[in-house]
Image (cartoon, rainbow, N blue to C red):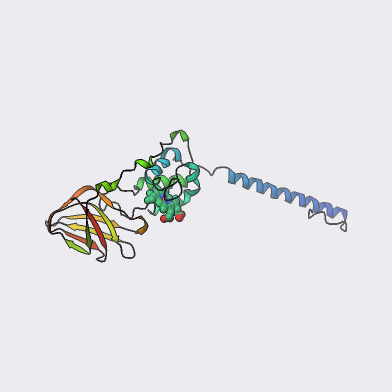
Amino acid sequence: MWPWVKGSACLRLSCTGFRIRGIVSHFVAVLVLLVSASLLSAHTVITTKITWSREVSRIAYLHCASCHHDGGSSFSLMTYDEARPWAEAIKQQVIARRMPPWNAVKGFGEFKNDRGLTQEEIGIIANWVTGGAPEGNSAYMPARPDFAAKVDETQNSGLQVFVSGTLVTKGRLDVIGIEAKQVPPPGTLQVIAQRPDGSVEPLIWVEQFNPRYTGTYYFQNVLRFPAGTKIQIMPPKGEVTLVVKK
Ligand code: HEC
């Protein structure tokens, strides 16, 4: 029942007035609905030249897709349609450096399997999202990564040397990697090595440690430590294993 057809007890004139007002407000309501629906369905205002197809997909394929694909450890971020609903969350995760999970502070130790984003890559993603997260021309999409062809980092592996607190090496050690084993709350750990000649080598600085994503960090170059090198972990309750050449 329409609200303005309310019996015949009212005077004809006022009924008509009521009725017209009813129709007008009904119209306005429909208009508001239409306008807001078209606002929702129309694309957000695009204020960036950065697109998924050209820039963002390349970063995602390089740094995210190994986990974020169908059959991977998390939801797929392989296509625009899959990534677009996550745009805000992606921006927040990469700015906070929670994704990709890496846990190591950049610039303290250099790792060849470094998964962390550069500041520039973070900027590209953030600006893409802020600018409306446009798709761009899909002709620019890079080739899908080949997940099967992932390099097996373990073929690098050597002997494991466990370090708790501080260790002074008895013999020479050629260190190729490091893994955080015990990171006391609040999840921060720093490891340095001081050679007998006094030179200090930063090994790793772990922050926001997430035990679900641990793994071995492989150094860019083999670190050679002569006997008498002091490996020191802060806080002293921390524990790591060093991967050393056999
Ligand atoms: C080593 C595997 C791995 C990599 C690499 C990785 N992620 Fe993730 N990501 C996960 C897993 C597992 C989850 C779900 C569980 C969690 O939140 O830890 C997740 C969750 C997320 C979430 C949802 C977080 C939330 O709860 O809102 C976003 C967004 C995300 N990842 C974005 C990214 C982006 C962007 C990259 C690349 C720049 C990336 N991830 C790289 C494993 C990964």
List x then y, in percent, for residue 187: 33, 62
Q: Quadrant of residue 65?
A: top left
Residue 91 visible, this angle: no
Q: Residue at x 31, y 65 (%)?
A: 184
In this rendered view, identify the residue nearer to me: 27 or 145: 145
The residue nearer to you, when weighing 68 against 236, is: 68
Which residue: 55% across, 42% down?
43
Question: Closer to the camera, 194 or 143?
Answer: 143
From this view, report whether residue 209 is shown above or below residue 220: below
The percent position of residue 186, horizontal first and vertical second, equals 34, 64
Check the picture and name the quadrant holding the N terminus.
bottom right
User: Percent position (x, y) of residue 15?
Assistant: 84, 54
- Residue at horizontal 30%, vertical 57%? 206
- Relative to residue 87, is residue 108 drawn left or right? left
Q: Is residue 197 above or below residue 56?
A: below
- Decide if residue 240 is in sight here: yes
x, y (%) of residue 73?
A: 42, 50
